[in-house]
């Protein structure tokens, strides 16, 4: 699982603008978790698919 900070801030693989556009358009679908602690979580494979990143690129970064 990854969040906004893992993908945009820490790994720098996606720009803030691109993330916000995908979220507004409904392309990003957050997971429904019991305790989110005010942070939306996403499957790393789903984020890679939405942004056209190489498969496994976010998981290799260690973003959790």
Image (cartoon, grey):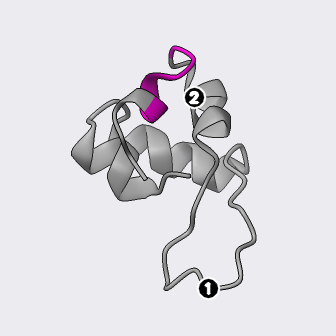
| Lateral position of residue 36 relative to residue 26, left or right | left
- What secondary structure is found at the residue carrying circle 1? loop
Label 1 crowd (10 A; few <14 / some 14-19 / many >=20): few
Picture quarter containing residue 49? top right
Report the residue marked by disc 1.
35
**Front: mark 1 or 2:** 1
Crowd around label 2: few <14 · some 14–19 · many ≥20 (10 Å): some
Q: Position of residue 62 (x, y in %)?
A: 36, 40
- Determine the residue positioned at 51% across, 19% down: 53
Snapshot quadrant of residue 51: top right
Label disc, if present, on residue 48 of the rendered structure: 2
Which of marks 2 and 1 precedes in the sequence? 1
Mark seen at residue 52: none
* Label 2 secondary element: helix
Residue 62 in magenta stretch: no
Q: Quadrant of residue 5?
A: bottom left
Q: Is residue 54 above or below residue 48?
A: above
Please report the bounds of the magenta region as a residue range: 54-59
């Amino acid at each position: 699982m990854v969040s906004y900070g893992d993908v945009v801030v820490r790994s720098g693989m996606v720009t803030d603008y691109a993330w916000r556009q995908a979220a507004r358009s409904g392309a990003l679908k957050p997971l429904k978790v019991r305790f989110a602690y005010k942070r939306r979580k996403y499957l790393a494979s789903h984020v890679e698919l939405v942004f056209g990143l190489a498969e496994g690129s976010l998981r290799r970064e260690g973003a959790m």
